[in-house]
Image (cartoon, grey):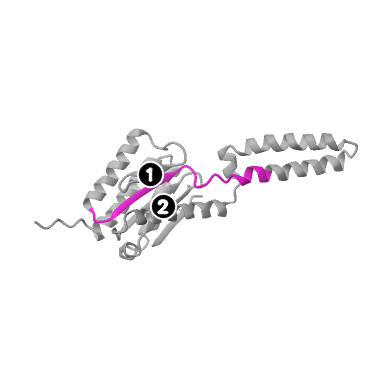
Amino acid sequence: MVAHSAEEAPREVGDIETANMKSPFTPEEHQRIDAAIAAIKGDTAADLCVVVTHVSDRYPLYPITWASIGAITLGALVSLFRPETASRIVIEFQLCFLIVMTLLLDWLPLRLSIVPQRVKRAHAWQLAHREFNAHAIANPNQRHRILLFVSLGERFVEIVADNETHAMSPDGAWNKIVDRFLANVKAGRVADGVLDAIASCGAILKQHHPNQPSMP
């Protein structure tokens, strides 16, 4: 199993899978993507799976951690510059600050902004490989497969392929697919990026794993 990924400066086999919140695509876009995957499935002896998620993890500890650090820092500053302030007042102020900041930082865009990039990348990578392994376990007789994984919140896209498919693909093919996808995302065309990536992955599968006609 070989993975190719890029980090933007973002089940049933044959269907697009969306996780964590509602689908980022309109019903029409969803139908176009499903049709593209179904066409590739009919033309090849391999599986092409697509997973698109808004976020790879909720990162629940980060809001409370940052809010706690802020509350402690605030209490220390009050004690330093206003030593006459009663301890009870300082503690109440800290608690109010902690509650408000925890709720504020729980808003997804802010929550993602306080998570280190390496952590977001690691969580997205782990989810991509869990999805690949889950599809492999669900269909163990299928040797050849490609998973296109997109995590919008982390701005992460990864293509995971079995070793044989990877070895047969042209040099740099995966990176080119990822680069074009990221260019589409930056232009606000997420669905078009997915469709283009599906077509490119499908072309590799059709070339190296064509569907063999059944014997009469």
Q: Secondary structure at mark 1?
A: strand
User: Does the magenta-highlighted stretch encompass residue 117?
Assistant: no
Horizontal side of 89 relative to 47 (left or right) equals right
Residue contact at pointers 2 and 1, CB within 8 angstroms: yes
Name the residue: 37% across, 34% down: 26
Residue designated by label 2: 131
Quadrant containing the C terminus is bottom left
Span of residues in magenta: 44-66
- The image position of residue 130, as x and y in percent, is 44, 54
The residue at the point 35 percent across, 64 percent down is 163
Q: Residues within 10 Å of mark 2 (few under 14, many from 20)?
A: some
> Residue 25: image x %, image y %?
39, 37
The amino acid type found where label 1 is placed reads Glu
Mark 1 neighbour class, 10 Å CA radius: few under 14, some 14 to 19, many 20 or more: some
Q: Position of residue 24 (x, y in %)?
A: 42, 38
Q: Secondary structure at mark 2?
A: helix
Under mark 2, the amino acid is Glu
At x 56% / y 53%, what residue is drawn? 119
Q: Which mark is residue 17?
A: 1
Mark 2 and mark 1: Cα distance apart in space = 10 Å
Closer to the chain start, of discs 2 and 1, is 1
